[in-house]
Structure formats: C-alpha cells, structure tokens
C-alpha cells in the first residue's frame, strides 16, 4: 500500500521529513477495522511528533490522526462495523497513523461518517471534535454550574481546529454564553459565523475585554493555544471556583496563581482513552456518532477550510508547514491517493 512516512525527525524543510513509501497491507485482528482511507486532516500533533519522535530501528514512522474512509475488513471480535461501512475517526497515537491507503483502528474509537458530508469534510472533524467534547463535558464538566459565576465559557483560540468545533458544540449542547478569541479580521468573522456570542482579541489583554462585556466572571475557560501567554489573564478573569482546561504544552505554568480562587486545572488529551485502553474507551465512538447526528441535523458544520489532493508527501509537507505557521483557520484536509 502507498503511505507517507519518515525515519529521522526534523524540520519540514528537509527532503526526508516526509517521504512517499510502500508498505505491506495490514491485516485486521481482534476488534480492529481495516479502513480504506479516503481523506485525512492534519493537526498540531502531526508536526510535533514529526519533529521529535524517531521510529524504532530502521522502520518507517507513519503519522496522521484523522481519517474518513470505508471499512474493507473487520477483525473476528469486531461487532460494531462491517465491510462497506463509511466511518470517521482519530485513531491512536501509539499505533501507525492514517497517512496510508489502508489503516487499522480499534472499532471502539470509530464513528459513522456523517451522511451529509463528503470524505474531506468528514475527515476535518474527529480529533478536534473529540478533544473539544471531552474538554467541555469530561474535564470542565460544563453542565455543573459554578456558584456565583457567569454561565459562560471562554474559548481561547476560537478560529483554530479545536476552537472552531468547540464553539459549535458549546452553542448546540449547552446554554452557556460562548466567548471566543481571535485576532485577524478573517478569523474574527469566522468565529462569529460559528455562533460565538462574543469575540475578543487574544493579541490584547483578555481580562479587561471580558470585564467590558459585562457578562460577569466566566465559570469556565478552555485554552486551545498559547496557554503560557494567557494564563495570568485567565487567573484574573475566571470566577472563583471556576474550572480551567487546556490542550497545548506550555513550557511554564504558574499554577499557584489559581490557588486563591480554588480554580481547578484540567489537561485534556484525546489519546488518553486509547493509550491506556480505559474501560470507557468506547465513549469516543459514541461521541463521534453524536457529532455525526449534529452534523446531519444541520446543527454543526465542518471546519474544513483548505483541500489538497492527492494524499502524498508533497501535499503533506505543505499542510504541515501551513499549520506550523500558526496562521491557519479551521482545518487543512488531504483527499485521495
């Protein structure tokens, strides 16, 4: 099968950073599905792993943690899907990735592809939707009120991949006032179009802008990017006993700034359930099916903003470079081998 991989971690500008390769076709065992990949999207985890993680020995490392495609075979213990089913999913970071014609994935973390979306539109959603959903409902527990706080969530980085879907999920599945951040005219318009009640500028101090809105101190803050830069502002603006979640990897984090307000701090990593085979691992399949329902009901839209074709090393390099620039809006998706 065709695939894209690398043997030596390094910057995307190097010729060997991503290479077109041929690998043996994988075989489905246990609860695995063998999926013919139709489209993949690129996430920050892709370039973070590519720049730092070497494969074992002389093997190739294949990246990719978003896909839509067709099940071509199911392992003997699989019961949720069968050959011919159209699916979408984000996979597991401890297994080979989706940048390949054929891919193995545990059926418990797979959802049915939204019928109203094409392959590329569907591939834009799984990793970011799972991350946003888990952050909002499993980590921040936004359905449980914070006494005295404004019933509001601040989403930092509202125009990025995770922020774009978090805004929509928060609007559709909660009664919270949704405040999102953006900084450029096109991203401000994008976030408003996704349904944010208020949009503020994350290139400026956040706390004064929240105060100017007059909604009160938000109960919840979800940071998708530049947490290190904004943490001081978050400590100032969040309500006492509020809850703060983030998904990036700040080099420093002054947790003591949150003690006086008894703010709870939450990390979100979408891969935790699949890494540790947690007893509730199948919750990810249920989340993806719920997202598919919301999409097909017209309540959530794809966050795809750029299509590239075909799925090959040259186009993946373009996508990685675009994401690393920090200026992307929504999701970059590659389709077709």
Image (cartoon, grey):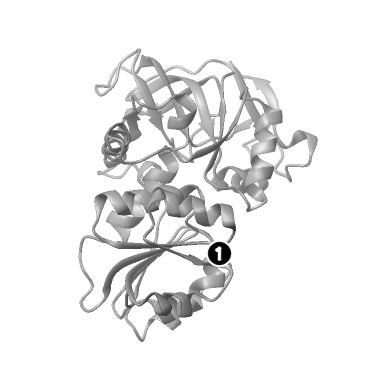
Q: Is residue 52 visible?
A: no
Circle 1 residue: 226
Q: Quadrant of the C terminus?
A: top right
Q: Position of residue 133 (x, y in %)?
A: 33, 49
Q: Position of residue 22 (x, y in %)?
A: 64, 18
Q: Position of residue 15 (x, y in %)?
A: 79, 34
| Residue found 46% across the figure and 57% down from its top | 247
| Residue found 28% across the figure and 38% down from its top | 294
Q: Quadrant of the N terminus?
A: top right
Secondary structure of the residue carrying numbered label 1: loop
Q: Count numbered badges in the picture.
A: 1
Q: Is residue 331 visible?
A: yes
Which of the 4 image quadrants contains residue 187? bottom right
Closer to us: 68 or 29: 68
Closer to us: 212 or 12: 212
Q: Quick check: 151 above or below 124?
A: below
Which of the 4 image quadrants contains residue 126? top left
Tell me: 224 left or right of 84. Answer: right
Q: Position of residue 323 (x, y in %)?
A: 62, 46
């Amino acid at each position: 099968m065709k695939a894209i991989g690398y043997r030596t971690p390094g910057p995307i500008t190097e010729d060997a950073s991503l290479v077109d390769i041929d690998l043996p076709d994988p075989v489905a065992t246990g609860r695995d599905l063998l999926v013919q990949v139709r489209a993949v999207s690129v996430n920050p985890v892709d370039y973070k792993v590519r720049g730092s993680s070497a494969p074992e020995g002389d093997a190739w490392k294949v990246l990719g943690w978003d896909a839509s495609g067709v099940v071509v075979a199911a392992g003997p213990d699989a019961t949720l899907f069968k050959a011919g089913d159209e699916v979408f999913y984000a996979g597991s970071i401890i297994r080979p990735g989706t940048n390949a014609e054929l891919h193995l994935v545990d059926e418990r973390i797979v959802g049915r592809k939204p019928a109203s979306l094409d392959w590329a539109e569907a591939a834009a959603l799984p990793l970011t939707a799972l991350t946003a959903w888990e952050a909002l409902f499993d980590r921040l527990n936004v359905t449980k009120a914070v006494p005295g706080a404004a019933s509001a969530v601040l989403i930092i980085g509202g125009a990025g991949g995770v922020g774009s879907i978090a805004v929509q999920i928060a609007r559709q599945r909660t009664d919270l006032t949704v405040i999102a951040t953006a900084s450029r005219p096109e991203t401000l318009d994008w976030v408003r179009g996704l349904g944010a009640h208020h949009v503020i500028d994350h290139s400026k101090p956040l706390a004064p802008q929240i105060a100017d809105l007059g909604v009160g101190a938000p109960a919840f803050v979800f940071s998708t990017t530049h947490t290190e830069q904004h943490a001081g502002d978050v400590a100032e603006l969040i309500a006492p006993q509020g809850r703060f979640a983030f998904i990036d990897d700040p080099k420093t984090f002054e947790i003591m700034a949150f003690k006086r307000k008894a703010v709870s701090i939450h990390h979100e990593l979408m891969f935790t359930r699949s890494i540790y085979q947690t007893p509730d691992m199948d919750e990810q399949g249920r989340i993806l099916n719920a997202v598919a329902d919301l999409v097909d009901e017209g309540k959530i839209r794809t966050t795809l903003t750029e299509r590239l074709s075909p799925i090959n090393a040259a186009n993946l390099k373009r996508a990685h470079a675009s994401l690393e620039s920090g200026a992307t809006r929504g999701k970059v998706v590659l389709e077709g081998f």
